Amino acid sequence: MKLDESLFRAARVAIALCAAAAFGVRAQSLTPPSGTAEKDPLTFEVASVKPSAAACPPACGLIRPTVGSQGYHAEGATLRSLMTVAYSVTDRQISGGPTWIDTDRFDIEAKAARPRNTDDLHAMLQHLLEERFNLKLRHEMREESALALVVAKAGAKMPVHDPDDEDYAPMGIQPVRGTDGGVCFATIPGRNVTMKYFAFMLSRIMDRNVVDNTGLPARYDVNLQFVPDGVHPNGPDGQPLPISSDCSDVFYALPKQLGLQLETAKAPVEYLVVEHVEKPAAN
């Protein structure tokens, strides 16, 4: 059942408040077509980068791989959000740079000569940002407190996805209704998902980075519904929105719904420091 429009808007606000992603994120790794050369340059064949002319919303931070995993499409995306996708980092792992990297919005259309896997597309997007924005970064590794994603004692509860299916849909965060009609303010649905990728998604909504220590090698179908900590928004009438009994905080939801859990850990975390950046010239 879909949320009515007013509840949907309110739930979207709740998700933004808990620092969840405001845009679609990368698709997962694809197996390159057989017989293709792997030594061709990791640059897009054609690419357009220009200031966004559309209002925000609706064109507000969308970043997604194109159909066929042959490029990227972005609408109203800030440079910071583009960097989080290209370099697979969270907002908190980026520092430095002028204020406009968080405020100015850009549209991107980029296409490769052939379908590419996710690692290649990320490298190509990195090269595009570095070229068009004259972006220069310093990479730092810091050992710090993190969260480890592990299998709970009762075992994983996620169905293994068909290994022959090469459709790797992007994951995102969205609000939905629970079975009792109440609202789950954050839902992470995904199919054909690696645990490394799922840990990255969790990093975007937690206050620390999440590392994959599950040891699970396959791809899975996941559907995690939870209420972000401290989020209790009101509806358009000013009354508190009903929270579904299907939802709980993420630490309780993970073992109950997926058979996974989070444990405190120490881990190396990469940080990006912006040393130089310029607004892109006309294409």
Image: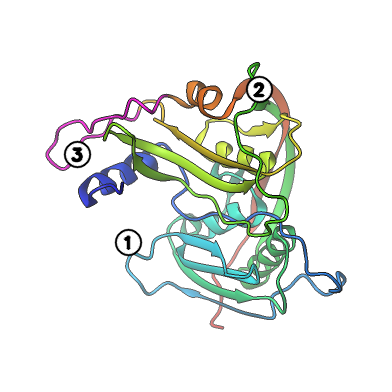
* Local secondary structure at mark 1: loop
Evaluate if marks 2 and 1 touch, with contact meaning CB atoms under 8 Å apart: no
Whichever of labels 1 and 3 marks the residue nearer the N terminus, that label is 1
Q: CA distance from mark 3 to mark 2?
A: 38 Å
What residue do we see at 66% from left, 47% from top? Answer: 272
* Local secondary structure at mark 3: loop
Vertical placement of 147 versus 34: above or below? above
Residue extent of the magenta highlight:
231-248
Mark 3 crowd level (few <14, some 14–19, many ≥20, 10 Å Cα) = some
Instruction: Residue 56: give x, y in percent of width and height.
Output: 34, 63
Q: Which mark is residue 81?
A: none
What residue do we see at 63% from left, 66% from top? Answer: 129
Residue situated in front as seen by the camera: 182 or 241: 182
What residue do we see at 72% from left, 59% from top? Answer: 30
Amino acid type, label 1? Pro
Which quadrant would residue 269 be assigned to in this image? top right
User: Badge 2 is on which residue?
Assistant: 155
User: Badge 1 is on which residue?
Assistant: 57
Amino acid type, label 2? Gly
Mark 2 crowd level (few <14, some 14–19, many ≥20, 10 Å Cα) = few
Instruction: Residue 23: give x, y in percent of width and height.
Output: 47, 55
User: Badge 3 is on which residue?
Assistant: 235
Left or right of 146 in this view: 77: left
Evaluate if marks 3 and 2 touch, with contact meaning CB atoms under 8 Å apart: no
Q: CA distance from mark 2 to mark 1?
A: 42 Å
Residue extending farthest to the left is 237
Residue situated in front as seen by the camera: 20 or 283: 20
Amino acid type, label 3? Gly
